[in-house]
Image: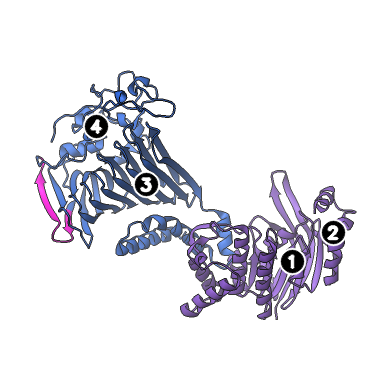
Chain colours: A blue, B purple
Amino acid sequence: MTEITTEKARIGAPSAQPFINGFTEEGESLSPINANASKAPLAGEAVKRHSHGGGVGIPDSSRAGRLTSYNLADFKPLTGLEEDWRFTPLKRLRGLHSEVLAGAAPTVTVSGPDQVTVETVARGDKRIGSAGIPEDRVSANAWENFSEATVLTIPAEFEADTEVTVVIEGTSTEAAAQHLVIVAEKFSKAVVILNHQGSAVVSENIEIVVEDGANLTVVSLQEWNDDAVHASSQQAKIGRDAKFKHVVVSLGGDLVRVTPSTRFTAPGGEAEMFGLYFADAGQHLEQRLFVDHAVANCTSNVLYKGALQGRNAHAVWVGDVLIRKEAEGTDSYEANRNLLLTDGARADSVPNLEIETGLIKGAGHASATGRLDDEHLFYLMARGIPEDVARRLVVRGFLHEIIQQIKVPALEERLTEAVERELAVTNN
Amino acid sequence: MSTLEIKDLHVSIDTEQGTKEILKGVSLTIKTGQTHAIMGPNGSGKSTLASTIAGHPRYKVTSGTITLDGEDVLAMTVDQRARAGLFLAMQYPVEVPGVSMTNFLRTAKTAIDGEAPKLRTWTKDVKAAMAQLRIDADFAERNVNEGFSGGEKKRVEILQLELFKPKFAILDETDSGLDVDALKVVSEGVNRAHEAGNMGTLLITHYTRILRYIKPDFVHVFVDGQVVEEGGPELADRLEDEGYDRYATGAGAATIAAAAQA
């Protein structure tokens, strides 16, 4: 699937009034005459076709306007000034954006119920490209260079009573490309844990198809060694009345950049996207997510929480939620919270919300970054609790809100321990 | 039998206008079994005394001493003071998100006693203490003080007082903001802790109302960072009738204004 796709959907760019005919101040557009097509490339035809050279006099301000293509050549070389790369230290990408990704891909080992099928397929497999399309150069580079993909299928109506664990083990730091497809067929139910470990320099595309009525949880753990560099585009396509829960946990690695997206393609879908990260000295942990409400009556809830400690610990969170004109009855909320445990750490947090219809149930966004509160510590210490224990209590409590969303007891326990280890690093 | 001794205590805080002296030489001795009431108008330094004993970092001791059975309290960290047997029931208890009451109480009890409480008796003790203070059982599952009303927060402070069994309890305006029913419940809790034996109490209050329920042995009147008058319980009665006006002479204008408002 290397066909060049260069269409761009441009909806709701603030300075481009003509695009939404009949758009009132309330954001309502009730006349069917105005119901023009406006879908993401994967959700159907693009509203407009033109070259991808950067817009024709229209600022590229809508999330829907971002260039998507399977072809690396369509993406210009990165300068670091691009909106979606401005926080990323390109020098530390170790060539993921500029080199041919010829290294050996991390090995993939799957364990879980027998009914779940695991296939290794060639590039031409029809399931490749079914849920994802690169949205940036690093993702396109992986798409251009991967040699084979792992396809995981949870068969229709099968309800897995144990989780599916996918161990993705890096063994080399030569820049590599990886591709995974996860298909949850109709009315199936499963939890898939992607466990990234070892040492690697890898750009990864993960496509997730959640078919009608399916209930899928994907937990992506980044427990890499200190030298790993990892870019991961995880794109999910959500069917009718399907439920999707996505949890990103980034703890290890030198640079980890996860870009999850959820696209609703039929009404009644529900998505929950959670994230937990703990950035230590020198670590760059970035997450940029996108929720595309392209159809009516879907709900999404996003919560990412991070703790940072040590010099030049850097976390980036950018949350884009787009509620398109067709997405009436949408209920959406996104929030990010950061806790700075020491001086010298930095958290960038940008919640973006675009709403193109007023006929929604709710839409909200929030972001807060703060220090460990001295008054909290004083209160706990005034009850005899030593300072280090008090600090751990507060941080553990802060992050536990995400861990308890996973609902896999063994994994929750493991992550609680992982957080404890992080806290022990600088004896916080 | 323990003794908490405060000698010629001077305390300052840093403000935008520079260093400001709040306590200007306070001396006070409390022994186990005694209840001392400290009364005074707003801004007289009562709460500063309470926070200084507990070790709040905002307050700088410039001279004087605080000792507990001869041990230098000022040399101890905040948590060491609590483990030594000092308890401050705070005027404004803070909310600590993400930390459940159950976990907090057990962690604190373990720190204070130096060993984890026996799970079965501990759970029973907590439940019983909560019931006596009319605290809903579901509070145990909630985060520390999160979403509690002012009155609920004060009850939870007294709950801790009863569970942690300190040598000395400092109650910083525990009565403020409570309605009469809550005031009774809270006072009963303090009296129970007192009757249980080895506790001395320093009761800081603006109003005489709580003294109807908790009987002080000694009353100290605080004005402008100093004790201006001391006496027995009869002094509290006199304050109820006369207010703080008669201490206004010689004190700063701010004190007079504050006293007049009271």
Secondary structure of the residue carrying tag 1 is: helix
* Tag 2 residue: B243
Residue B166: x %, y % from top left: 63, 74
For residue A301, the mark is 3
Labels 2 and 1 share a subunit: yes
Which residue is at the front of the view, A139 or B14?
Answer: A139
Mark 1 or 4, closer to the camera: 1
Which chain letter goes with mark 2? B
Q: Can residue A162 be seen in this view?
A: yes
Neighbour class for label 2 at 10 Å: few (<14), some, many (≥20)?
A: some
Q: Do labels 3 and 4 share a chain?
A: yes
Residue pointed to by mark 1: B210
Q: What stretch is highlighted in magenta?
A: A108-123
Judged by its main secondary structure, the magenta piece is strand
State the CA–CA distance, disc 1 to disc 3: 48 Å
Callout 4: SS: loop
